[in-house]
Image (cartoon, grey):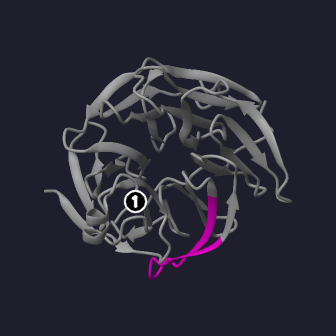
C-alpha cells in the first residue's frame, strides 16, 4: 500500500528555481541554490516545526546549479561552466572547467560521493540531445563518467556506497551502476526504471535504500525502491517540484525545493506555494551527505 504525505510550506521567500538542498550538520545549517538568480542560500531549519529561515545569500555572475560544503565550511559551487571554490573568508577560486567556453549548456545538479568527491552534470540550453555530461571532480581534474545525456539531474548513492543512481530528466530515466568509493570508478550503466507520469528531477536516498524523487510538473515527491516500485508519495503545494533532501539533526525532515519557472500568472495564482521551500515528515531517515574533500588528489 502506497503511503501518502502532505508537505508544508516552510518559508516565506519565493525562488525562481530553488534546487539542491544540502544539510550541513557541523554548522546546523541548510544550503540550497536559486539557479537562475545565481545564488547560494544559507538558512536555519527548525526540526520541530519544519520552518526554514533564510540567513545569508552568496551571489555569482551567472547560473549556479549546485553547491556542496567541506567539513571546514568551504563551498564548491557549480557555476555555469566551471567549478568554483569559496573559502571561509569568501575568497573565490576556479577549481576546474567542466564545459567548453560558450557552449549552449550549463552545469546542473551535483552531489558528493561517499569518499568526498564532487560529481556534477550538465544540461542543454537548446534542443540538442545526447551531448551532456556527468563528471567527477578529482582534485582539480574532471573525469567524465557519461557524455551522452540531455539533462543530467539527481544523484544518490546506496547506503553502502556501492551503487550510484543518476537521472537523465528528458528521457525520464533513472540509471544505476556499481560504484567503487575508494577509486571513484563506476561499472556499466543500467536503466533502473522510467517515470511514466512526470519528469524526474532531483533525488536523494534514505537509510533503507529507497529513492525519493522530485517530479517536476507533477507536484509531488515519489519514494520508489530500487526496483521502481512506488512506496510513498509526498504531495507538494507547487507543481514544479525540483529536489528533496533529508535534513535536521536526525535526518528525519524531508526538505523540498520548488520553482516558479514555466508557470503562467494563472498557474501561480492557483499554486501560490510555487517557488517556496517545503518540508515533510515521512517516517524514515536519510543518508548523511558526505562532506566535500577539496584537497583530495
Q: Residue at x 36, y 56 (%)?
A: 241
Other residues around mark 1 within 10 Å, as few (<14) / some (14–19) / many (≥20)? many
Range of the magenta residues? 40-55
Q: Horizontal placement of 69 versus 281: left or right?
A: right
Q: How many numbered marks, from 0 up?
A: 1
Q: State the residue in front, 286 or 94.
A: 94
What element does badge 1 sit on? loop
Answer whether residue 49 is magenta in the image.
yes
Q: State the residue in front, 284 or 272.
A: 272
Q: Residue at x 82, y 57 (%)?
A: 90
Q: Residue at x 40, y 69 (%)?
A: 278
Dominant SS type (magenta): strand
Q: Quadrant of the C terminus?
A: top right
Can you name the residue that lies furthest to the front here? 265
Q: Horizontal placement of 98 versus 128: left or right?
A: right
Q: Horizontal placement of 190 versus 142: left or right?
A: left
Say if 250 sits above or below 46 in the image. Answer: above
Q: Residue at x 44, y 25 (%)?
A: 149
Residue 68: image location, x then y, percent: 64, 50
Q: Quadrant of the N terminus?
A: bottom left
Residue 174: image location, x then y, percent: 34, 34
Residue ID for mark 1: 260
Residue 152: image location, x then y, percent: 46, 33
Residue 79: image location, x then y, percent: 65, 42
Residue 106, quarter of picture: top right
Residue 264, quarter of picture: bottom left
Say if 143 sits above or below 170 in the image. Answer: above
Can you name the residue that lies furthest to the bottom here? 49
Amino acid at each position: 500500500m502506497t503511503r501518502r504525505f502532505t508537505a508544508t510550506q516552510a518559508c516565506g521567500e519565493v525562488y525562481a528555481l530553488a534546487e539542491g538542498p544540502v544539510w550541513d550538520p557541523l554548522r546546523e545549517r541548510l544550503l540550497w541554490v536559486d539557479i537562475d538568480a545565481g545564488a547560494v542560500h544559507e538558512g536555519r531549519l527548525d526540526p520541530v516545526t519544519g520552518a526554514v529561515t533564510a540567513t545569508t545569500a552568496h551571489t555569482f555572475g551567472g547560473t549556479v546549479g549546485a553547491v556542496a560544503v567541506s567539513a571546514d565550511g568551504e563551498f564548491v559551487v557549480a557555476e555555469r561552466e566551471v567549478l568554483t571554490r569559496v573559502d571561509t573568508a569568501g575568497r573565490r577560486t576556479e577549481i576546474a572547467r567542466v564545459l567548453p567556453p560558450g557552449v549552449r549548456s550549463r552545469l546542473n545538479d551535483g552531489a558528493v560521493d561517499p569518499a568526498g568527491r564532487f560529481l556534477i552534470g550538465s544540461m542543454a540550453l537548446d534542443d540538442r540531445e545526447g551531448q551532456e555530461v556527468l563528471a567527477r571532480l578529482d582534485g582539480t581534474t574532471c573525469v567524465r563518467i557519461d557524455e551522452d545525456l540531455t539533462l543530467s539531474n539527481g544523484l544518490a548513492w546506496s547506503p553502502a556506497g556501492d551503487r550510484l543512481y543518476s537521472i537523465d530528466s528528458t528521457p525520464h530515466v533513472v540509471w544505476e551502476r556499481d560504484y567503487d568509493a575508494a577509486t571513484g570508478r563506476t561499472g556499466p550503466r543500467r536503466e533502473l526504471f522510467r517515470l511514466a507520469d512526470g519528469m524526474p528531477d532531483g533525488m536523494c536516498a534514505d537509510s533503507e535504500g529507497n529513492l525519493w524523487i522530485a517530479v517536476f510538473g507533477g507536484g509531488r515527491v515519489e519514494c520508489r525502491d530500487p526496483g521502481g516500485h512506488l512506496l510513498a508519495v509526498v504531495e507538494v503545494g507547487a507543481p514544479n517540484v525540483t529536489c528533496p533532501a533529508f535534513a535536521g539533526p536526525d535526518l528525519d525532515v524531508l526538505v523540498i525545493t520548488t520553482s516558479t519557472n514555466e508557470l503562467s500568472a494563472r498557474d501561480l495564482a492557483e499554486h501560490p506555494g510555487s517557488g517556496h521551500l517545503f518540508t515533510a515528515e515521512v517516517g524514515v531517515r536519510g543518508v548523511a551527505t558526505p562532506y566535500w574533500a577539496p584537497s583530495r588528489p
